[in-house]
Image (cartoon, coloured by chain):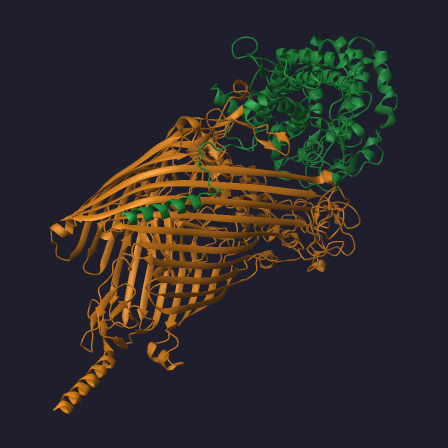
Amino acid sequence: MKRINKYLMVMLVLIIASCQDFETDLNATNFESPNDEILGSDPVALLSTAGNIMNSWFITTHSTSGPGAAFATMADVSTCSWGNFGMRDLSSEPRLAFNNTSSYGNNVTKSYFNSLYSLLTDSNTIVAAVENGTEFDDPQMVLAMGKFGQALSIGYLALVFDKVWLYDAEGPIGEGDGSTDYETGMAYALDRLDEAIAIADANSFTLPESWIPGYTGTSENLSELMNSIGARMLVSNVRNTAQKTNITWSKVIQYADNGITNDFEILMDDVVWYDLIPKTYLVYPGWARLDMRIVNMLDPTQPDYWTEDLVSVPESTSPIDARLNSDFEFLGSNSFRPERGKYHFSNYRYSRYDDYITEWTINVTEFSKAELDMYKAEALLMTNDVSGAAAIVNAGTRITRGELPAVAENTTDVQAAIHHERLVEFSFTSMGLGFFEMRKEDQLQSGTLLHFPVPGEALDAIPADYYTFGGTSGVAGEDYSTGGWR
Amino acid sequence: MKTKKRGILALLLVFIVHLSFAQQKTISGTVTDQDGLPLPGVNILVKGTKTGTQTGFDGEYTIAGNVGQVLIYTYLGQKETTRTIDAKNSINVQMEEDAEALQEVVVTGVAGATDKRKLSVTVASVSAEELKKVPAGSAASALQGKVSGISVNNLGRPGQGATIILRGAANLYGSQSPLVILDGVFVEGGLADINVDDIASFEIVKGASASSLYGSRAGNGVIVISSKRGKIGKTEVTVRAETGFSKITNLVDTNQSHGYELASDWQNFQGQYTKYEGVTYPSNYQSVYANNGPTAVQGSRIESADGYSDNPYGVYNDFQDLFFKTGINKTLYSSISSGGERAKTFFSFENTDAEGILAETEGYKRSSIRANIDYQVFDWLTFKASNNYIRVSDFSPGGGDGVFRSITRLAPDANLIANNPDGQPYYFKPDPWESEIDNPLYSLYSRDAESKQQRFLGGYLLNFKLTDWLNADVEYSFENNTYRFNRTNKYETYTTSGDEIGFGYSKGSLNKNNSFDLSQKVQTTLNFAKTFGDLDVKSKLSYLAEDRHYEYYSVTGNDFKFKNLPSLDNFDSANVSANSNQQDERAQNMFAILGLVFKDRYIVDGLFRRDGSSLFGSENRWNNYYRVSGAYRISEDIKIPGIQELKINAARGTSGQRPGFDWQYEATALNTGVLSSARRAGNPFLKPSLTTETEYGLNAAFLNRFRLSVAYSNQVASDQFMIVNLFSPANAGKSSQWQNVGDLESDTYELSLNSKIIDKQNVKWNVGVNFTKSSATITKLNAPEQKVGPDDLFLIKEGVEFGSMFGRKFVTDLNTMGSQLPDGATIADYSVNSDGVVVETASIGTTSEAAIIEVDSDGVAVNEKIGNQNADFRVGITSNFSYKNFDFYMLWDWKQGGDVYNRNGQWNTISERNVMVDQAGKADSEKKTRVYYGSLYDVNQNNSFWVEDASYVKLREISLAYSIPSKVLQKINGNFFKEVKLSLIGRNILTISDYKGWDPEVSQYSADTQQYFAVDYGVYPNQSSYSMSLQLKF
């Protein structure tokens, strides 16, 4: 008996002694990621999420997994025959349908799609939290940001896809699962944007610096930015020239008049803020170059298309636009594969932002004043104020940076001048600007898709049938281009 | 009269005294083994004293002792025998074979230590004898070719070890590695750091039915390793030193011609650079690339009109020679083993240094110290301690995965050894016409990345003998890993930039990361073993608790402020970023197992286990596992002539695989202050995957020479994990979720045959053959199909064999071409060319020749099965031949089938470096254009053209050893040395394969599934090693 007692004691002692620092609770907490309960209700978490909105939108639109690079080559602004980022397949000539299957290796829509819906969810949560009375130090600031996030996410989905799903914190908006077309989607986005503008105008606050680094985020500045985004989204959403008459141009003028007065820049930190497309891979030595069409616009003696027989094209000696020498760099030889089509060759690259690809932690321009000016000019043109439009063009970068002659006061010339500025001056600032312009003016080469289908993997997950656009898939003129500059 | 009595008394006294002194006497005798042959080296100890001796080469011994004292005789493989000293002066002993010591007993996965002949499940074992012929670099690669049912693929980089898969794959997502237990410690840090000299045996539990005892950790099988322990007897010291070198033996051929017009005076510049027509060169041109500026060329090359790549270069360099070096390997091992009745100890020290075969890169260094102690505290209490401390320093090579591609992508006239403008070696952009290629030697040279690791594995076991038939174990074991990594890129490290020349200083960066991993285990077990007449009953009841805590943090600083100061203080605070990670896993498990053996021939066993783990979803916290098995020893009932042993067995059991740490949580990932945009939904219903196995086996020993073991296993792994895509607008922005969605079924056939072909006194020859055939198919999938692995090459879909490659194809036959003719063309316009693809006949040899992608009726490229990374079957053959003191050992490994996707080969075609582009030397009628080969590249899409059959036959291990005969040893220093053995060792020295890359054994890690795939990109190639080893025992 004694012996057994001794055993038990020894056993117990040993077990206890070895159990220091030994946890047995089978509920292990995950300390790495905030759980959804907290994200949805805790004011501190909600404030952090609000602060994330601009970064999330910026990184998504400037990502290599998004459609930005493909937009640039499809628009014949950039040219590249490396297969990455969909640049080559979508800009091949003749234009083909987009491979929307889930097995396609160069998918450019899935991450973009999912990321913007995550952003929409976050924005909805924030708006609902403020409207339900959650305690914030500055609830109006958070509300403005939340609505801005809703506008940006739905707006940038409508610009890119043919279908958008609308939902808020309560659930789907509209019929059924909330799916709707791009026009209705953009209208919803602009409504939210207007609400955000109203809140910013009616209140006085300053965003914490980390929300948009390098930017003085006063409510006045934020209102100007939001108005500018409104102009951009309203004008850029149309799929063809015929739809331009549907734009409320007076609204565009209103947005432009209340918009930015200086370039909108953000300070990159190369950790969570970085600009891959367009400012890295569309300009980096060895990567994408300037499409010959733009070279030709800057110097009409240069070819606008690299034909099969051309071996090399010499440097421009007398460009009509001074920016060919200031913003671009001549390259003597081509590194693209000739068998992929010499139409991808070019002798110039964009060098205006070479500081960025050397320093990485400097300011980059996201929305330039010149872009806003062009929206106003176009709106004046479309509301029959040709001289007003010409005046804006002649006061802008066409003269100050391009040193071109003043534009004559007729619709065709002013239209061409606006087109010129859009492609030359600021198409390397934000996602897709060159593509939106070419799309709106029916200039995209025949067969180019006008918007992307819902990503194949998302269709599989619903599940829904596969469909795509481009080539001859879809409705002519609405889903793929029937026009083209050549 | 009185004097006489006194005299007699005195005499008696003297006699008695004489007798008592005479009781200390000398005993001598001969010790023989169970066959009657003399046994040298038997340890004899006088119980209770330190007096001991050993038998000589003829089995004879002499020892001093008193009558009544007990002599203990011990020898490896024999049962310990005792004799009491009595009146006789001579004690001859015949020892009995001890099944346990001969590794004929298995302790893993069964109710108690069981004789192999009475196992009802399949457990394979490998002993130290087999391992020491050619000691592997680590425990990870030690098992290759020696056991059926195991697939071992070596990872070339020193210190990485090997991937081990037991039977068929059991997971769609998640590691395929088996659970490894070393002296009771659950090894979390991998086998690559465990040295082989310390290992006494491996027990390998391949199927779920046998590993059922280990429950939800054992779905991939279990490997149990026991390290060497002290033995009773004289102190024995072993010293082994091995030195050798490793090198690459197969180099990859590359294209040595180009397709551009040469300048008319190009021969004047031969040896300096290749002068092309249409290009102006700067003075002192070094045959390197510059984007712009005074060292850049002007103009473009002109393509030859014929389009063939058959023109010579001006300079020919061999890069693989520069890139690969001969690596020196050194190992020093020493151990001391001793033991008495009360305590047995084993100490060892090992030091390994393997340089690896990449230039400018140091390799892997390891030091290991072991102390194993066994105490017999009281008759009823034993205490075993196993301690192992390991220190590792490892240099990972620079350049990332692309460095292996770069070295075969450079044009032969690229100048890798030119200096950079500031004097640094290895000019950064060495290929004159490729702006994308960074000098791989520069990447290796500028890399300064070292990881240091310290691991401690401790296992402590107390055993209480409660009664003769009941004892209790209390065990505590833990593994403590600390890992430190430091990577410095100096300020002057080059990178592509906007500078004129195309590259400039990156301003450097510093990355430090540390991790700490402590996994502990406490287990109490009651062991029951009793014989009731003809019935042997063994049983265990056990409770096990596990706790694992993991912490990690990493800090990175970018853009140094001061040069040559690798400190985190040397950055602007805005340029420093950090992140961290913490994981906790806990489990509580209990099991009961019962094994019955009736009349030594009818065997039945069953077990039940219940696991609770913090990794399971909260709604499925507890899961159960079971096994039933039986065996029948036919040879005990029916005597078949020639057959010594015949047993059949069948088993059915379950085990599982636990989900990963954060798979179940409803949380959004946070990184550097930013919420992730690719969000995952949680799953509280997530449960472990369940592997159910049915196994049938047959074991036989016949003709006194052969031992055969055959097994068939059908394994269904259900509730497989997979990341399933969700429709994000309907799921609050969440686009994926871990779910249990499918079944993976595998069938495995195994066969092992060992034979003693010659078994004489001076000549012995054993040959062993093992054969494995295994395949795994996805039989059910409740989710949309998915592509995983490197470049999404592998398809997970219902009905598909796991490991199948899917992709596009070129049209290779005219029938298929007939169904996809373009408008206006007829089939007569097409034919199959010399590469086996269909092309327009008129275009052959011209720049219009192009391979055609096979499309379906809608004109969309087909997506079909283009390869299978699984072998058709694997065979391992070991041959042990010994003649007197010479020993010749070989291990051949034959893998038939198993495709590798040669991504390096495909990618090299775009820069025209693939050797097939070289047309020089071909008849003009057979030449093909560069443009044509560009079409074969298919823009780096997955294409069947690049799938290669990587079947191989390898001579994995070979050794020739000579042991100095004991007669000679006795004359040296008074028989100081017990053994002196010199071996010449070769590893992986011969590879017979059609594979065009460096080595057909290719495993590339893919982080999405945490598994290895047969895609050749960024894979450090396997090497051949030659070395010499000297082993001394004294």
Percent coordinates x, y for residue A109 in the rendering = 58, 26
Q: Position of residue B621 (x, y in %)?
A: 40, 30
Residue B782 sits in quarter: top left
Is A425 located above or below residue B200 in the figure? above
Q: Is residue B194 left or right of residue B294?
A: left
**Depth check, front residue: A104 or B734:** B734
| Residue B1016 in the image, given as x and y percentages of width and height | 50, 46
Coordinates of residue B243 in the picture (x, y in percent)? 49, 66
Q: Nearer the viewer, residue B1014 or A134?
A: A134
- Which chain, by letter, is green? A
Compared across the picture, whether B551 is left or right of B590 comes to right
Residue B312 visible in the picture: no
Vertical placement of B341 versus B294: above or below? below
Is residue B696 positioned above or below A369 on the image?
A: below
Quadrant of the image containing the N terminus of chain B: bottom left
Residue at image position (39%, 77%) is: B976
On the rendered structure, is A196 left or right of B532? right
Query: Who is closer to the viewer here, B412 or B719?
Result: B719
Residue closest to the eye, B459 or B659: B459
Residue at 36% in and 58% down: B375
Question: How many marks on residues?
Answer: 0
Apparent colour of chain B: orange
